[in-house]
Image: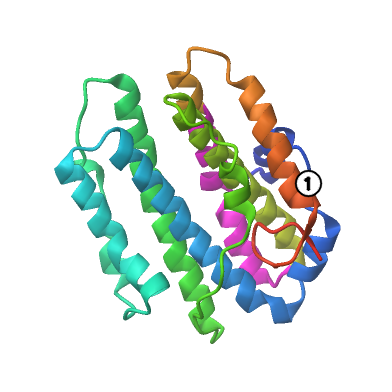
C-alpha cells in the first residue's frame, strides 16, 4: 500500500495535522487502554451515524428495523453492560439484501455507501476488541469526547442543508481518524502499527464517500461549508482539551 499517496489528499483536506503534544501522550503505554477503548467506541459511533442517515432519509420501516437489529448487540455491550456477543457471527448478518431500493439515484447511492461503511466499521469494532483481549485490556465504559459535539454544533437547521452539513462533518471525522492512525503508527509496537495502517484505505475512502454524497445533493458548491467545518475541526484539534481521547485536542 502506498501510504504517502493515500494520505496526501487527506492531509490537504484537513486544516491542521495532529499536534505533537497529542502524539506524545498517545504513545505512552499507560494511555493505550484508554486509546483503544475510545477507538472501539468511535467505530461503533461511525456505524451509528451511517445507520441514522439511512433510516432518516431513505429507509422504509423494514430496512430501518433491520439496521437497528444489526447494531443493537454492539450497543447493548458498549453502552448497556450487556453480555459480549459473538461478533463474528453478527457480522455475517450484515448486507444490502434487506435494504430498500429506491428510484432516487442519490438515495441508492446513500444506501450503498453507508451499508458498506456500517459493515466495515463494525468489523473494525471487533478487530479493536480482539486487540484489547489479546493484551488483557478489559472494556470499561468511558465518557465521550467534545469532538463530535463540537462539530455538529454548527449544523444548519433546515433541509437539505442540515443533511449536507452532517455529511461534511462525517467526512472530517473519517479523515481525522485516518490521519491519526498514520500519525500513531510509527510510535506503537509492530502488531499495532500493522493494524493501524491496515485501516487507512477504508477510512480514506469513507471521507471521500461523505463528500461525494454532500455535493451530489447540493445545488450549490459545498466548498464554503467544507472550509467552515475544516476551521471548526482544526480548532477542536489544536486547542487545549481536558479529556484525552482518540479525537481530542491538545492535552490540557
From the viewer's side, name the closer residue of 199 and 41: 41
Q: Position of residue 51 (x, y in %)?
A: 35, 47
Q: Is residue 239 above or below residue 79?
A: above
250, 206: nearer the viewer: 250
Tell whether 20 sits left or right of 138.
Answer: right
SS for dot 1: loop
Residue depicted at x 23% and y 46% = 64
Q: Position of residue 54 (x, y in %)?
A: 32, 39
Q: Position of residue 216 (x, y in %)?
A: 45, 20
Residue 210 highlighted magenta (yes or no) = yes
Main SS, magenta region, reads helix
Q: Determine whether 23 is above or below 132 in the image.
A: above
Say which of 199 and 104 sits in front. Answer: 104
Vertical relation: 38 (above or below) 100: below
Residue 248 falls left or right of residue 121: right
Q: Measured from the top left, where is residue 31 in percent x and y?
A: 70, 76
The residue under the point 62% across, 56% down is 197
Q: Residue at x 58, y 21 (%)?
A: 222
- Which stretch did the figure color magenta? 188-211
Residue 89 seen in the current view: yes
Q: What is the residue that sits farthest to the right in this orientation?
A: 20
Badge 1 crowding class, 10 Å Cα cut-off, few under 14, some 14 to 19, many 20 or more, is some
Name the residue that disc number 1 marks: 17
Q: Quadrant of residue 243?
A: bottom right
Amino acid at each position: 500500500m502506498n501510504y504517502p499517496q493515500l494520505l496526501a489528499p487527506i492531509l490537504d483536506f484537513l486544516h491542521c495535522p495532529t499536534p505533537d503534544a497529542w502524539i506524545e501522550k498517545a504513545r505512552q503505554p499507560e494511555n493505550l487502554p484508554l486509546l483503544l477503548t475510545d477507538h472501539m467506541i468511535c467505530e461503533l459511533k461511525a456505524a451509528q451515524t451511517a445507520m441514522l442517515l439511512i433510516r432518516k432519509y431513505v429507509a422504509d420501516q423494514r430496512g430501518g428495523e433491520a439496521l437497528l437489529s444489526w447494531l443493537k448487540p454492539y450497543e447493548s455491550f458498549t453502552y448497556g453492560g450487556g453480555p459480549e456477543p459473538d461478533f463474528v457471527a453478527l457480522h455475517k448478518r450484515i448486507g444490502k439484501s434487506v435494504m430498500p431500493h429506491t428510484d432516487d439515484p442519490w438515495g441508492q447511492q446513500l444506501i450503498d455507501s453507508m451499508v458498506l461503511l456500517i459493515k466495515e466499521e463494525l468489523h473494525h469494532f471487533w478487530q479493536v476488541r480482539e486487540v484489547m483481549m489479546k493484551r488483557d485490556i478489559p472494556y470499561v465504559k468511558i465518557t465521550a469526547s467534545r469532538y463530535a459535539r463540537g462539530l455538529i454544533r454548527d449544523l444548519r437547521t433546515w433541509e437539505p442543508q442540515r443533511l449536507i452539513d452532517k455529511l461534511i462533518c462525517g467526512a472530517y471525522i473519517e479523515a481525522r481518524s485516518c490521519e491519526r492512525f498514520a500519525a500513531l503508527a510509527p510510535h506503537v509496537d509492530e502488531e499495532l502499527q500493522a493494524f493501524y495502517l491496515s485501516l487507512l484505505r477504508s477510512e480514506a475512502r469513507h471521507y471521500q464517500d461523505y463528500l461525494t454524497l454532500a455535493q451530489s445533493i447540493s445545488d450549490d458548491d459545498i466548498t464554503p461549508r467544507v472550509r467552515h467545518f475544516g476551521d471548526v475541526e482544526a480548532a477542536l484539534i489544536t486547542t487545549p482539551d481536558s479529556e484525552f481521547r482518540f479525537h481530542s485536542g491538545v492535552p490540557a
